[in-house]
Amino acid sequence: MASGDVQSDESLYPIAVLIDELRNEDVQLRLNSIKKLSTIALALGVERTRSELIPFLTDTIYDEDEVLLALAEQLGTFTQLVGGESYVHVLLPPLESLAQVEETIVRDKAVDSLRILAPQHSATDLETYFIPTVKRLAQGDWFTSRTSASGLISVCYARVSNHVKGELRQLFKSLCQDDTPMVRRAAASKLGEFAKVVEPEYLRQELVTLFTNLANDEQDSVRLLAIEAGIAMAGLLRHEDLEQQMMQTLRSATEDKSWRVRYVVADKLVDLQKAVGPEITKNDLVGAYCSLLKDPEAEVRAAAASKLKDFCNSLPTDTREQIIMSQILPCVKDMVGDMNQHVKSALASVIMGLSPILGKDNTLEHLLPLFLNQLKDDYPEVRLNIISNLECINEVIGVRQLSQSLLPAIVELANDAKWRVRLGIIEYMPLLAGQLGPEFFDEKLSSLCMSWLTDHVFAIREAATNNLKKLVEKFGRDWAQNTVIPKVIQLARDQNYLYRMTCLFAINVLGEPCGQEVTQRMMLPTVITLASDPVANVRFNVAKTLQRIYPVLDSSALASHVKPALEKLSQDADHDVQYFANEALEMLPKA
């Protein structure tokens, strides 16, 4: 008898501990206990999890939001712990309660978990348990439950009977017409998803009307979500239905009184373009796009400008050039002189993409003057965006056409007060070098690349050394010997120890592309000389450099120069120097 009592006590222990922890005043302890729910469920077994743990959790859903959030997430993974898919409906009551709480993030997580569990129900269980849950949420007194219902209708629609489908469509319609804007907003955000599972006839007869009403809602937050849904629906409708039922609403959205709605149209225009096809694009969207490029709100113009290349690429090929030249290019020419820097910057990042579409003659006549104009722009981001996309124009007319205008822009950016702008131009140097060729580069830009090695910002000096490596890989060892290495070695004699360290950083990356002969003859002596530098930071970087370049060196150089230098550094007075010297010695191949 006594042993039976002990067993009973032990079986009650996990749930007792959970109850104690969930009643504890410490939020972190309660949160930890929720995160251990799966372990507790395993200890209890499936039957007691169903009969005790889940009802207990359902009854005690009054806690801090972070605890409820963890609970909502855990329950979505509980199917096997309650006995598999036959019993998955047991998890619905606590999640239904969580889907009605005030905190949005908890409701959303509960809905996510319910969406995971829906496909795990059999068709019978779906109608017996899941659909009533959805109905209760959709008809709840508080808007919180109704917003949650919007996200659940589409996941169960396809697997229920026609009668229940009719009820679900009616529920969704009532949510779209709800008095509370938050509910209409939630319904609008799920309209596109619901459209994908609804039969085509109901899509045309019922959902298009819902879309039209939501797209004309008094709240702009509802209208902008409706527009996103409309773009998803456009790809599901036949061409004639689309033209008759939806295009008028989508067209008027480009002139909506709220800039946020117009912004969404501009941002999603290329998706809409793909959904509606070439004919409607030509007749409707080109005009809409041009009006967005001229929008009074800068954010809308910037969003429209950023889509220029993609929109033009997706135009019907037979009329593409004519549409761009006659309708889009005039708007683009106006935007080059826009008052807003973000608009100009967005345009500069994509305008080069028009070159391959329009061809050499049109680029030279119409686009080149715009590029040259942007290269002289007051804002460094605009100039940088043009330079970063030079490969597009290089393929069509060659970058030499731009070289005379490029140089002043590059020099100005290279000396910009903002270090991030200087960093941006460094990253594009190898690309420019490849397009301009070594002679032009040596004459005009080589000194600029060397000046970055002595920049006062470390990130610039670091980027400059990596830039040198890429240039050597592009132009070859002979160029490195004549142009780069003498200037790098010169830094070893600089008064500023930071620049002496930059010399070592440059040698770190140049050893491999320059090869054994050049490294041993030109760079190794400099490194060995710096091993006697008065500054400890330089000396321990010598140890690191020798460790980095030793694979390039031959055995005689290692024995006669590298090893003695490292052995001397390992006896250095500075502990850091000793550490890195010993580390480098361990890496050296044993003679």
Image (cartoon, rainbow, N blue to C red):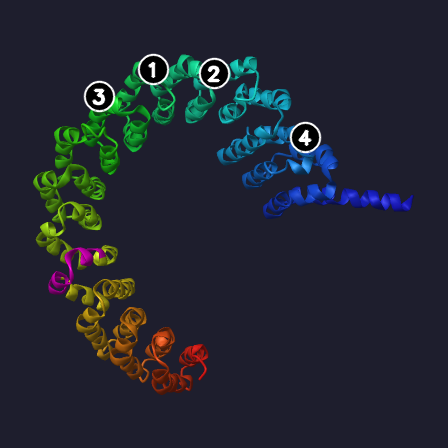
Residue type marked 3: Asn
Circles 1 and 2 in contact, beta carbons < 8 Å: no
In the depicted structure, whether residue 553 falls above or below residue 353: below
Q: Residue at x 66, y 37 (%)?
A: 80
State how far apart marks 2 and 3 are (Cα).
Answer: 35 Å
Q: Which residues are magenta?
A: 431-444
Above/below status of 255 relative to 454: above
| Amino acid type, callout 2 | Ser
Label 3 or label 4, whichever lies nearer to me, is 3
Is 215 inside the magenta-drawn segment?
A: no
Q: Which residue is mark 3?
A: 283
Q: Nearer the viewer, residue 483 or 146?
A: 483
- Label 4 CA crowd tier, 10 Å (few <14, some 14–19, many 20+): some
Q: Are marks 4 and 1 in contact (CB under 8 Å)?
A: no
Q: CA distance from mark 2 to mark 4?
A: 31 Å
Q: Quadrant of the N terminus?
A: top right
* Mark positioned earlier in the residue sequence (1 or 2): 2
Image coords of residue 140 (percent x, y): 55, 20
Which SS does the magenta portion mostly show?
A: helix
> From the viewer's perspective, is the residue at label 2 or at label 4 nearer?
4
Foreground tag (4 vs 1):
1
Give the residue pinned by disc 4.
Answer: 87
Disc 3 crowd, CA 10 A, few/some/many (<14, 14-19, 20+): few
Which quarter of the figure has residue 362?
top left
Mark 2 crowd level (few <14, some 14–19, many ≥20, 10 Å Cα): some
Residue underneath mark 1: 241
Q: Earlier in the sequence, mark 3 or mark 1?
A: 1
Helix, strand or loop status at disc 2:
helix
Q: Which residue is mark 2?
A: 174
Residue type indicated by callout 1: Asp
Query: Tag 3, which secondary structure?
Result: helix
